[in-house]
């Protein structure tokens, strides 16, 4: 990132600075996420009864806003240069800096791809004997492995995007090196890569807003969940059913369950919680009401 900032200023290339800004936003996003993961482990307090899981969501929102701000500034500068056409760019320096970025990203792609493949094989080759006493521990272990798999895949796709961006800057630098007057290519690359970065944040922004608006998580079929609860023994009706996420992977649910008179409430609570395990619901609150 430091090399790209220096090289971008030296070559007067916005495309190189855009790549540096992208890396800066990545670094800031990783730092914020690491803090959020650490803070989400803080114990719940009387004022924060659900804990601090939402810090992870707020950190993701801050990261998206930072990316949008940097992309907006660079896009504005690119448009200003197109309108006034007064900037000269050193294509040789631009190309060399982009080539360095390409080599770094290529190394990361190979390394992450190798780790992802090894992790995938080790996950499928490992088949422990599961007894009734250890089923919860094994299930938790599989869930952690799946999360690791998703994180590795996400990092891999992210670096592939960086690699494509470096190739684009290299091509633009080579063209400007040969044709110094074609500076518009640098500005087009800046606008295109800024747009690409913004598009890449849309899915994250949608997830963040969904959690903050307490939308039903995508992986939950709330109609199927309600039908399944209604089919439980001695359950007459389920109402006031709410499902939401505290953060990604931490799903909460609350509902009222109407039962026949004389039914054991503890058994109903156990049945409802056991049924909710198939949906991987983290926190279940049930109010049992008798007719």
Image (tube, rainbow, N blue to C red):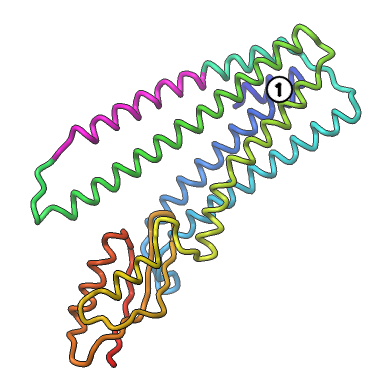
Q: Position of residue 58 (x, y in %)?
A: 54, 56
Q: Which residue is identified by label 1?
A: 8
Q: Position of residue 233 (x, y in %)?
A: 20, 77
Position of 232 relative to 31 (above/below): below
Q: Is residue 194 magenta?
A: no
Q: Quadrant of residue 168?
A: top right
The C terminus is located in which quarter?
Answer: bottom left
The N terminus is located in which quarter?
Answer: top right
Identify which residue is drawn at 62% across, 37% down: 197
Identify which residue is drawn at 55% across, 37% down: 26
Identify which residue is drawn at 39% across, 25% down: 113
On the picture, is 127 further left or further right than 3?
left
Position of 270 relative to 27 (above/below): below
Q: Is residue 124 magenta?
A: yes
Q: Could you classify mark 1 by the number of other residues whose Cα lies within 10 Å: few (under 14), some (14-19), or many (20 or more)?
A: many
Q: Position of residue 152 (x, y in %)?
A: 39, 35
Query: Residue reaching furthest top?
Result: 178
> In the image shown, does 70 or 237 lie closer to the viewer?
237
Which residues are the magenta region? 104-127
Identify which residue is drawn at 74% across, 35% down: 74
On the picture, is 139 further left or further right than 33?
left
Task: Tally the marks.
Answer: 1
> Under tag 1, what secondary structure?
helix
Q: Quadrant of residue 114?
A: top left
């Amino acid at each position: 990132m430091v090399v790209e900032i220096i090289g971008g200023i030296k070559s007067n290339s916005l495309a190189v600075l855009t790549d540096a800004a992208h890396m800066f936003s990545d670094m800031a996003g990783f730092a914020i996420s690491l803090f959020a993961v650490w803070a989400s482990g803080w114990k719940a307090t009387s004022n924060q009864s659900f804990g601090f899981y939402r810090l992870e969501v707020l950190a993701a929102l801050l990261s998206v806003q930072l990316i949008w701000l940097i992309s907006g500034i660079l896009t504005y500068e690119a448009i200003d240069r197109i309108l006034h056409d007064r900037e000269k760019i050193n294509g040789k320096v631009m190309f060399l800096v982009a080539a360095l970025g390409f080599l770094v990203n290529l190394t990361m792609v190979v390394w992450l791809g190798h780790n992802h493949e090894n992790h995938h094989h080790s996950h499928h080759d490992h088949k422990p004997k599961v007894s009734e006493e250890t089923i919860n521990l094994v299930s938790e272990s599989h869930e952690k492995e799946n999360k690791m798999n998703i994180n590795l895949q996400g990092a891999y796709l992210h670096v592939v995007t960086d690699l494509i961006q470096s190739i684009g800057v290299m091509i633009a630098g080579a063209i400007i090196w040969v044709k110094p007057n074609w500076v518009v290519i640098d500005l087009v690359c800046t606008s295109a890569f800024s747009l690409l970065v913004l598009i890449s944040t849309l899915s994250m922004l949608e997830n963040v807003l969904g959690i903050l608006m307490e939308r039903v998580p995508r992986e939950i079929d709330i109609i199927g969940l309600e039908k399944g609860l209604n089919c439980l023994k001695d359950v007459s009706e389920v109402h006031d059913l709410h499902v939401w996420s505290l953060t990604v992977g931490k799903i909460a649910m609350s509902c009222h369950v109407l039962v026949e008179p004389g039914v054991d409430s503890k058994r109903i609570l156990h049945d409802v919680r056991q049924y909710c395990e198939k949906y991987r619901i983290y926190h279940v609150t049930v109010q049992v009401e008798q007719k």
